[in-house]
Image (cartoon, rainbow, N blue to C red):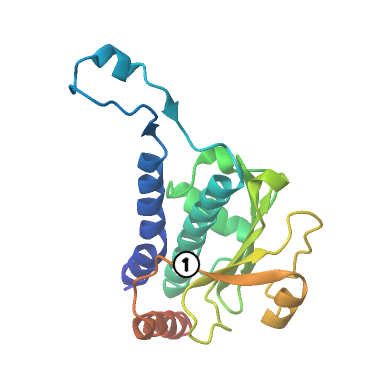
Amino acid sequence: MIYVVAGAFFVMVITPLIIQRQRSGHMATVEAQVSIGDVGSDSTQDRNAPIYRWPDSEVPRTAERLRDVSAVAVASITYVVESAMSGRTPHNAGEIIAGITQRQLIPNEWLTTQNGVLQLPHGTIHLRYSPNRLSVELISVPNEPKDGPAILIRVPDDENTGVGVRYFESMQLNGIVYPSPFAPLSDVISTGWRPRLFKQTQLPETERAQLEQWAKSATRK
């Protein structure tokens, strides 16, 4: 059953993000030259036509960071739930990182010597873990303003009242105030964060709620 939960979360979050990224990659390469006349009359000129690519800017970097932190969130909560159901509840974030690394769910080059911290090309992921609630909270901290806003993901999102699968992002790029681990939603909002929906989500709200409820009840047995 744990694979059902993990698979459903993967389908409703990660798969759409990957598909969207692949489509964006295809759209990012455009032939800048328009030919009028006989097609194929100058194939050399077509091959030498300039190619346009999206600039290395805030938008693509933010999308990449959201994809990566979402993937780590899925891997982490899957490991936590599966371990709890087997009677081996993880003790800390470092144990979770070690577990998902052993399963080759994240690249080894992301690892650091800090407990629960991953270093990526455009940001740093901090994994927070609550053994009592069997919850994970991940914050993706940008390396520089060009990397976009900070991102926060909670699984499960206990204070989600049915708005859909969401994450939070900082409303400013400089002077970001990071909330304390698993702070109430009101504190997160008051420190300058706003909720954002995964627009690609296709799982019906009732099914999402059932999956979250099942995960909670299964791990508390």
Residue at position x 46%, y 79% from top?
219
Which image quadrant: the C terminus?
A: bottom left
Q: Compared to 97, does 61 lie above or below?
A: above
**Which residue appears farthest toward the right when viewing the image?**
175
Which image quadrant: the N terminus?
A: bottom left
Residue 85 x %, y %: 42, 74
Q: Compared to 149, does 52 lie above or below?
A: above
Which residue is at the front of the view, 24 or 11? Answer: 24
Q: Quadrant of residue 44?
A: top left
Residue at position x 42%, y 68% from top?
82
Residue 76 x %, y %: 50, 61
Residue 41 x %, y %: 19, 15
Residue at position x 75%, y 64% from top?
178
What is the crowding at mark 1: few (fewer than 14 residues within 10 Å), some, or many (at least 20)?
some
Which residue is at the front of the view, 115 or 41? Answer: 41
Figure label count: 1
- In-image side of 117 versus 87 (left or right): right
Q: Compared to 120, does 177 lie above or below?
A: below
Residue at position x 52%, y 71% from top?
166
Q: Secondary structure at mark 1?
A: loop
Residue at image mark 1:
198
Q: Compared to 10, does 217 lie above or below?
A: below
Residue 52 x %, y %: 45, 31
Residue type, numbered disc 1: Phe
